[in-house]
Image: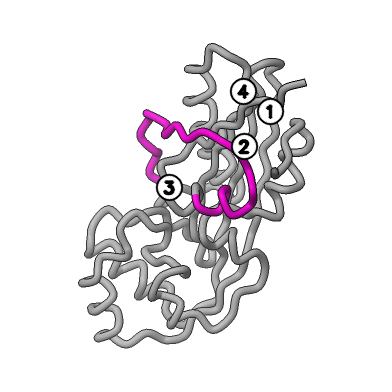
Amino acid sequence: MMEKRLILASASPRRRDLMIEGGYRFEVMAPQVDEPKVSGVDEPPELVAKAIALFKAEDVARLQEEPAVVLGADTLVACENDILGKPEDANHARDMLHRLSRTRHRVITGVALIDTGDGRKMVEACTSWITMRAMSEDEIESYIAGGEWEGKAGGYAVQETADRFIVKIDGSFTNVVGLPMELIGQMLPMFGLHPF
């Protein structure tokens, strides 16, 4: 029996790389819908991440003419009760980094799987805790000038130079990068998909 097609519903090169490192065969198809703005949303962050992951997966799933399993994901940062998505511009990123400096905050990734053959859906979330040291004004300005904040939840990427601000990660490192591979490894076999 032929293995089902797996489609990663994401434009993120980080998610693509994690799936390759995980040993999965898959296609990439970026969702065509705009992501909803999450900053200031008054809902539990886990629910928001799961809802957006499902939104992305459904957008790609509806375009499939042949059976496939579609994987959608969304990562956000939660500091106390505030949800921080991707910054809109450099000033927004600067505000986020000031907010996150000297905090212990959560990075949450929602993961959604849809089997377009039988309509089955599964949606989960993974949470990691980040302890970030105090960042000086000069460090924040230098980081903003480097442009790494663009397209990153909370305005930073732990796998790039922002790792120097991180004191400790409790939980999945790959979750903080954008795709919790431990959770993916539990979910995909339920849809008949395994690494090669």
What sort of colour scheme is used for the picture? one colour
Query: x%, y% of residue 83?
Result: 47, 56
**Distance in Å between CA atoms under marks 2 and 3:** 16 Å
- Identify residue for label 4: 68
74 or 96, which lies in front?
74
- Identify residue for label 3: 12
Query: x%, y% of residue 149?
Result: 32, 63
What kind of secondary structure does the magenta stretch mostly adopt?
A: loop
**Distance in Å between CA atoms under marks 1 and 3:** 22 Å
Magenta span covers which residues?
17-38
**Distance in Å between CA atoms under marks 4 and 2:** 13 Å
Mark 4 vs 2, N-terminal side? 4
**Distance in Å between CA atoms under marks 4 and 1:** 12 Å
Relative to 195, is 136 on the left or the right?
left
Q: Amino acid at mark 2?
A: Ala
What residue is drawn where x is 50% and y is 66%? 79
The disc placed on residue 121 is 1
Mark 1 vs 2, N-terminal side? 2
Quarter placement of the N terminus = top right
What residue is drawn where x is 22% and y is 64%? 91
Asked which secondary structure carries label 1, the reply is strand
**Distance in Å between CA atoms under marks 3 and 4:** 20 Å
**Distance in Å between CA atoms under marks 1 and 2:** 7 Å
The answer to whether mark 1 and mark 2 are in CB contact below 8 A is yes
Mark 1 vs 3, N-terminal side? 3
